[in-house]
Image (cartoon, grey):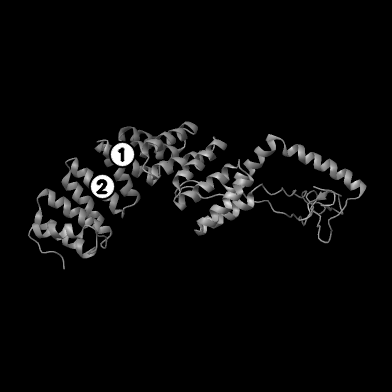
Amino acid sequence: MKAGDVRICPSCQARNKPQWEFCVRCGESLQGVAAGEPKPEAAKVGAEQEEGERRAESSPLFWLTTVVGLLLLGGGAVYFVTNRPMETPAVPAAAFARATPGAAPAVEAAPARPGSSHLTVGRELLEKGDVIRALAELAAGIQEVPDDPIMRNLYAHALWQSGNKDEAFLQFREAIRLAPQDLGYHIDLARAFSSSGRTTEAVDQYQACVDLEPRSPVCLRELGSAVSKLGDPRRGATLLGQALELMPDNFFILQDLAAAQSKAGDRAGAIQSYRRLVEMAPKDAVNRGMLAETLYQDGKAQEAMAVVRTGIQLDANAAQPHRDLGTLLDRAGNFAEAVQEYREYLRLAPNAPDAKTVSARAAELGGSPAS
């Protein structure tokens, strides 16, 4: 700070920036204190203070602790899609009340993190859907602080939303280069690959996540699902099983595991997983239907139909169970009952995407289409 660009605390003689309303050292109010030349004794104190600040801020430990503290206050890095909330480091308060006798010492106000205003505004604009202005704000922040991984990651999200995916990939990678140990940045890049249909690259990136944190259920689940989609459901099921061990009651991990087991031909494992899913969400028609289908494929036709009928009893207004039951009855050769279930499905869901197909099948089996 220049000599004439300070506000001298009337209590402790500490030098403060002209925009600060309270003393950074003791918390004394600076209202009414004009910026100006410090007195000789204040200048000496201020010179020592400034030199101490300069040395501290040049230390790698200072920046490490600053970044860690901001991340703890503001949350982790931005996760792609919805599993991880957008974060922005908390900006320390510019003013603290002066300590009173007997009270704990006042906390010194920390200087605003470089680029924090661009980060905060850019994040808010992006959350409001104003992508163009968010891009401009974040680009300005990167120009001010080019080595900020948080800024790079958020900028990548803005680019992604704007449709500029090639540049978004570059910025996701840059965030990783700047903070290679941050798991969130790796996951964001992996999910970007997955969203773009680049499954092989997604698998490689998810593997990097698991290598970084072997006991992360998020990484294990994402890698397991990606590996299964890539054509190795057996390995996918193994990874998803490991994730489930870490989070035994996670519905979505269990759902992915059941799908991988079914795809791998492990019907017994899939049936067990789908049974657990149905127990956890009895009215979930999709997993109930998958359980019934897997049971039918395993030669348990009557049990499969009983599972679907239970779903109908639990939710009389659900259309999908009637469709599932009609299909099972149709495949079992019980055409009359199949037609009845098809008709009920069409009554409950007349505008379903497969309504014409179901209606045609009902007509083919001897029943009239639903009116």
The amino acid type of the residue labelled 2 equals Met
Viewer-side residue, 2 vs 232: 2
Among all residues in the image, which is located at the extreme right? 40
Q: Residue at x 13, y 49 (%)?
A: 331
What residue did someone put label 1 on? 260
Question: Residue tagged by mark 2?
Answer: 290
Residue 74 higher or lower than 51, as above or below: below
Residue visible at 25% across and 46% down? Answer: 291
Task: Determine which quarter of the picture holds residue 51.
Answer: top right
**Does residue 169 appear to the left or right of 318 in the view shown?**
right
Percent coordinates x, y for residue 191 in the rendering:
43, 43
Q: Earlier in the sequence, mark 1 or mark 2?
A: 1
Can residue 77 be seen? no
The local secondary structure at tag 2 comes to helix
- Which dot marks residue 34? none
The image shows a total of numbered marks equal to 2
